[in-house]
Image (spheres, rainbow, N blue to C red):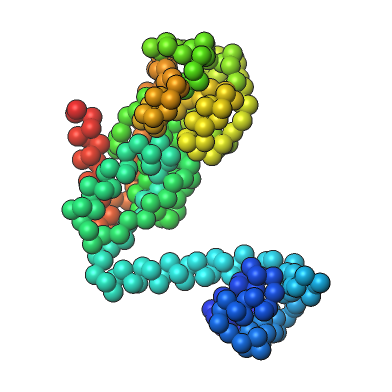
Amino acid sequence: MINPAHFDLQSLRVFQLVAQCGGLTQAANKSHMTLSALSKRIADLERTVGCALFLRVRRGLELTPAGHELVQHARMVLDKVNQMAGEMSDFATGVRGHVKVWANTSAVIQFLPHDLASFLASQPMIRISLEERLSQDVVVALLSGETDIGVFADNVPAYDIRKSVYRRDRLVVLVPAGHPLAGRPEVSFDETLEYDFVGLNQGSSLLQRLTDAASALDKVVRLRIQVSSFDAICRMIEAGLGIGVLPDGAVRPELLGAGLHAVYLSDAWASRILWLGVRDEAGLLPEARTLLEHLRAAGSASASR
């Protein structure tokens, strides 16, 4: 049994650097260590794990299967240590609290930049970590306590989550210039299904909404290509690879000026709610509760305009 106490962070950093460089000499130069000192670090680490981490080849060094596995673990350990150091540094420099927010792409692109900027302008000593995730992942993170606050789409089950309306948005069909649907003020989803689509990757709540709507019509969405972001969807549509469905606030004005056309979907399901959610509001730290109240207020102000 390997004793975890025998691992030290510096040896893991050196190992990771050697793995990246593929040789001892380059790694020694980058780490400002002597070649002998670096070699000893690697040898000591191999004794700790009880097996070889590198194979000597003509080009330098290659990772063994054990080495590949250790690279993954070392990266996670060092990332966590760096995160810990950053958060402790925040306290040392006067930051009063840290709030974690996970949100889906629609919220990150359309609403959160303005809302978080206005919050931090009034609360500069609070640090916010924002992660863009799929809606279902946001709900899982809320339930597990991995995030304090989440923003997710209304077609994702969210049992045991305290929800409130954050924003409402409307979906549009984005089509290239010259497309048969261009110039229409609105169109039914049924009419769009005869064309190829550019869509988000599997797991996105927006793609699920489209496939559910198509299924209700006994049809399918003809996905020609799938990408990971709204910006990539727009670029693929610009290139003539299909049409796509996006929130109206995610379509950049310069795209419309360049010849793309946004056509509103007339279907009732095309008007969406983005939920603001927490697992246990009473258990939130004061800084997280303050941000939650700010986001709720921003959503209410937007709805009243």
Query: In front: 284, or 100?
Result: 100
Whole-percent x, y for residue 182 in the image: 46, 13
For the question of whether residue 210 can be seen, the reply is no
Seen in the picture, residue 1 relative to 153 is either above or below; the reply is below
Quadrant where the N terminus is found in the figure: bottom right
Q: Is residue 76 left or right of residue 188?
A: right
Whole-percent x, y for residue 61 in the image: 74, 72
Quadrant where the C terminus is found in the figure: top left
The residue lying furthest to the right in this view is 58
Query: In front: 174, or 274?
Result: 174
Image-quadrant location for residue 252: top left
Seen in the picture, residue 128 relative to 168 is either above or below; the reply is below
Q: Is residue 300 left or right of residue 132?
A: left
Task: Identify the residue at image location x=38%, y=51%.
Answer: 130
Seen in the picture, residue 210 relative to 139 is either above or below; the reply is above
Whole-percent x, y for residue 6 in the image: 59, 84
For the question of whether residue 276 can be seen, the reply is yes
Image-quadrant location for residue 108: top left
Task: Identify the residue at image location x=23%, y=50%.
Answer: 119
Seen in the picture, residue 158 relative to 198 is either above or below; the reply is below
Whole-percent x, y for residue 169 in the image: 35, 28
Task: Identify the residue at image location x=55%, y=65%.
Answer: 76
